[in-house]
Amino acid sequence: MTAFVVVVGFSVAAAAGTLVRWRVSTALGPGGTLMVNVAGAFVLGLLAATSGAAATIIGTAGLGALTTVSGILPESARLSRASPALALGYVSLTITGATIAAYVGLALA
C-alpha cells in the first residue's frame, strides 16, 4: 500500500468510528457508549490474530475512534450526579464487558 492509501484509509476509518460512536451514544445514552465499547473490544480481539496495513488501520483508527475512554468519562460523570454507585457500576461493567468481549474475540480468531 502506498502512504497515500494508508493515510486516506486511516482518515476514513477514524471518521467512520467516530460517527458511529456519536450516533449510537446520542441515540442510546450511556447504554450506547457501553455497547460500542464492548462490541469494539470484541472486533479488536478478532483482529488481533491478523496482520497487515488493513488490520492496523481498522484496529487503530476505526476501532480506536469507536471505543474511547473519552466516551466513558462524560457518561460516568452524568451518572454520578444521580448516583455515585451507578457511575461506578457503569465504569466497572464497561471495563469487565470489554475485557470479556476481547477475550472471546481472541478465542474465536
Image (cartoon, grey):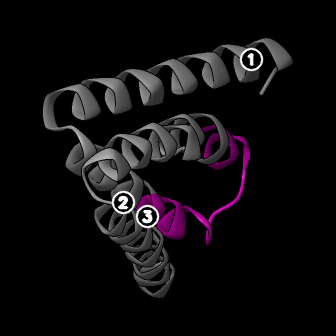
Q: Residues within 10 Å of mark 3 (few under 14, many from 20)?
A: some
**Region of the chain picked out in magenta, as a range:** 41-58
> In percent of the image, x 53 and y 27: which residue is there?
13
Q: Amino acid at mark 3?
A: Val
Residue 33: image location, x then y, percent: 33, 45
Please give the label number shown on residue 91.
3
Q: Quadrant of residue 3?
A: top right
Mark before the other along the chain sequence, 3 or 1:
1
Query: Residue furthest toward the right?
Result: 3
- Residue at the disc numbered 1: 7
Q: Are marks 3 and 1 in contact (CB under 8 Å)?
A: no
Separation (CA) of disc 2 from disc 1: 37 Å
Dominant secondary-structure state across the stretch colored magenta? helix
- Label 3 residue SS: helix
> In the rendered structure, does residue 43 fall within the stretch colored magenta?
yes
Residue 77: image location, x then y, percent: 43, 44
> In percent of the image, x 50 and y 18: which residue is there?
15
Pick the residue in front: 48 or 19.
19
- Residue at the disc numbered 2: 87
Q: Amino acid at mark 2?
A: Ala
Q: Are marks 3 and 2 in contact (CB under 8 Å)?
A: yes
- Between tags 2 and 1, which lies in front? 2
Pick the residue in front: 49 or 78.
78
